[in-house]
Amino acid sequence: MPSVSLTVFNVLDILNSDIPQIIETGGDDMPLNLAMEFLNKIVTAGRGEILTTDVGVSFTGGGFGLGVNVQEQLHTISSDGSLTNDKIIAEVNVAAPIGLGFRFNLVPDAISLDVGASVKFVYRAYTQKIGAVQLTSLVESDDPMQSLMENTLVTAGWALPIDIGVNLNLPVGLRVSAVARNINGNYNMKDYTELGGWLNEMTSLAGMDPIYQDNAPATDIGAEYAVQVPWTLDAGFGWAPYIGKALQPSLAVDLSDVLGVIDGSKKLLDNASAGVELKLLSFLTARAGINKGYYSVGVGLDLLIAHLDVSYFVREFGVEIGDKRVDALTIRFNLGVDGQ
């Protein structure tokens, strides 16, 4: 059913900056003031993120599932964390997965095997790096939106990656899982000289009229080229003992890119995560976890068909753990009906 989630990064740094006061004051200059405050006070050297939003709808029934998800991300990158070298990159992802799974009862009421696969159409688009100078020029132009459409480069493309997974379900709530992710992760990309030209192409594919009126020469579209995203093998262990409906605990331990860890190209701690969940009275859920050595906490509330989840966690954006920790807050709301 429909779901919406919002993730804000650098939460504590934002609260300690002037950003809350700028939002409270408002005014026509608020967008530019927010951007300048963020670039000047929050962005540090290396990679980072500002904001991620997800909107999706899905349906599952028996062993069949399908969905559509649209995601927006705002990334940052900087050589030294100074205002003149800070850049912003916008990314849009659209994914339409379809999956099918089967359960085989190996030992009745004791051991079973789940086997499933999904294929999804994925479309990704990235803008060029936008720095403080270009951002100021865009905001201060007579028509900021038109200027953005005409002066922003875009790279976009599609792929049909496949995931294949298995679960071995054992007695007393034990489960061992493995999944091969991103098989056939070949992205067919093209470069566009104008954001507006790319947007018009998207609206045309959707059967809509163009929304960008191009006053300049027609958008130049580059030749298609391939970008290969490697597949990974992930593994996990779970335990969800049945105590009763009033108290439902569970434990999960995951290891991503198992083959990379085995051959030594990836470190165990960099790819390991673990979490515990405790569901109380079927409507309140408390969660805690650790990922790459960083903690996370969360709480969930289920009220009939409405579900609200809030989580606070830390991610590593540096090369090594401890190089660049960034905290984040996610709020997720969805409507759903579970027929089980």
Image: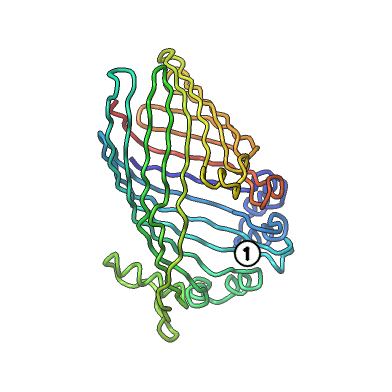
Give the colour scheme shown: rainbow
* Residue 60 percent across, percent down from the top left: 29, 38
* Residue 126 percent across, percent down from the top left: 49, 65
210 sits left or right of 307 in the view? left
Image quarter for residue 186? bottom left
Q: How many marks?
A: 1
The structure residue drawn at horizontal position 26% and vertical position 67%, both measured from the top left corner, is: 207
The structure residue drawn at horizontal position 63% and vertical position 35%, both measured from the top left corner, is: 295
Image quarter for residue 109? top left
The residue tagged 1 is 32
Find numbered disc 1 in the image and state the secondary structure of the residue it sits on. helix
Q: Is residue 170 above or below residue 141?
A: above
* Residue 160 percent across, percent down from the top left: 35, 57
Crowd class of label 1 (few under 14; some 14 to 19; many from 20; radius 10 Å): some
Query: In what quadrant of the picture does the C terminus appear?
Result: top left
* Residue 175 percent across, percent down from the top left: 42, 27
Query: In what quadrant of the picture does the N terminus appear?
Result: top left
> Depth check: 100 or 66 in front?
100
117 sits left or right of 276 in the view? left
105 sits left or right of 175 in the view? left
The amino acid type of the residue labelled 1 equals: Leu
> Depth check: 9 or 158 in front?
158
The structure residue drawn at horizontal position 63% and vertical position 71%, both measured from the top left corner, is: 136
Q: Is residue 4 above or below residue 141?
A: above
List the single residue furthest toward the front. 263
> Depth check: 311 or 20 in front?
311
Image quarter for residue 169? top left
